[in-house]
Image: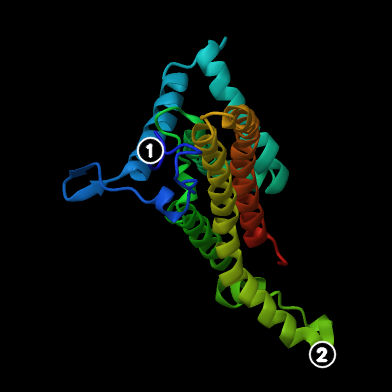
Amino acid sequence: MLAFETDCHIFEGCGFPTPGLHSFLFKPMFTVGGIEFNKPILLAALSTIIVIGFFWAAFRKPEIVPGKLQMIGEAGYDFVRRGVVYETIGKREGEKYVPLMVSLFFFIWIMNLWAIIPLAQFPVTSVIAFPAGLAALVYILWVSLTFKRHGFIGGWKNITGYDRSLGPVFPMVMFFEFLSNLFIRPFTHAVRLFANMFAGHVLLLIFTIGTWYLLNGIGMAYSAVSFLMVIVMTVFELFIQALQAYVFILLSCSYIQGALAEHH
């Protein structure tokens, strides 16, 4: 089900129903305890249930010789642990952050995957509130770790890139480091995920609606080309969805590593 419906075809006196911001706005589907659930919130809730349910099923009765489900769970967990956390933070410091990064990776990945699932067909992370909330979680963790590890004065030195050896440019560097770390970093962390999924969804909508819109008369030849692009974009989106989840946790680990390091 697309974000909006259309019965319009080419040569019928109607224009192409271009997707826009209205494609990302949804009316509440139902209310529970005063909380309104629209499509993105419902998909985010389902993503949470899927991630928790999968890992619970995979590890509730772990075996020395793992079954298929446990093997898949171990492979996913180990990919994040060894391929991202250990490589970025290190084994000794990073072990305690593995569960968080595994949760973030699979939660974001599943929310992205809804874009190509029939009936859902909407990436939850294309709504800025979700990437912003996750980025805020990482931001709070990063800032708290910085001051916990280095103390109040040392924390500010870490955040501002304090280095007297820079000479005359020392104040300017501190200002830009302060601005970058406390304001630009969380903003770009959220927007990078949001913008990629937003743009990808718009492209999929354009070609999907275009396939239907051109399905009339001679336009059917162009409709076939548009449908081929839907397939190509879907395959491409599969790659981007996993990549954006990976990049998000890679940056998260990089920020944590910076908080734990002696020098920013």
Q: Give the total of numbered labels.
A: 2
Image vertical order of residue 35 relative to residue 209, above or below? below
Task: Indicate the quadrant containing the N terminus: top left, top right, bottom left or bottom right.
Answer: top left
* In this view, the mark in front (2 or 1): 1
SS at circle 2: helix
Question: Of all residues shown, which one is farthest toward the left?
Answer: 33
Task: Tell whether 216 sits left or right of 56.
Answer: right
Res. 111 in view: yes
Res. 101 in view: no
Task: Indicate the quadrant containing the C terminus: top left, top right, bottom left or bottom right.
Answer: bottom right
Residue at x 73%, y 85% (from the top left corner)? 172
Label 2 – label 1 distance at C-alpha: 53 Å
Image vertical order of residue 130 relative to residue 207, above or below? below
Task: Tell whether 165 sits left or right of 130.
Answer: right
Q: Position of residue 126 (x, y in %)?
A: 49, 49
SS at circle 1: helix
Q: Nearer the viewer, residue 240 or 144?
A: 240
Q: To which residue does mark 2 refer?
A: 168
Q: Label 2 sits on what residue type?
A: Pro
Q: Quadrant of residue 7?
A: top left
Question: Of all residues shown, which one is farthest toward the bottom?
Answer: 168
Task: Tell whether 120 sits left or right of 219.
Answer: left
Q: Position of residue 8 (x, y in %)?
A: 42, 39
Residue at x 38%, y 44% (from the top left corner)? 40
Residue at x 57%, y 38% (from the top left corner)? 207
Q: To which residue does mark 1 refer?
A: 43
For disc 2, the neighbor class at 10 Å (few under 14, some 14 to 19, many from 20) is few
Q: Position of residue 119 (x, y in %)?
A: 39, 29
Specify which label sits upstream in the sequence, 2 or 1.
1
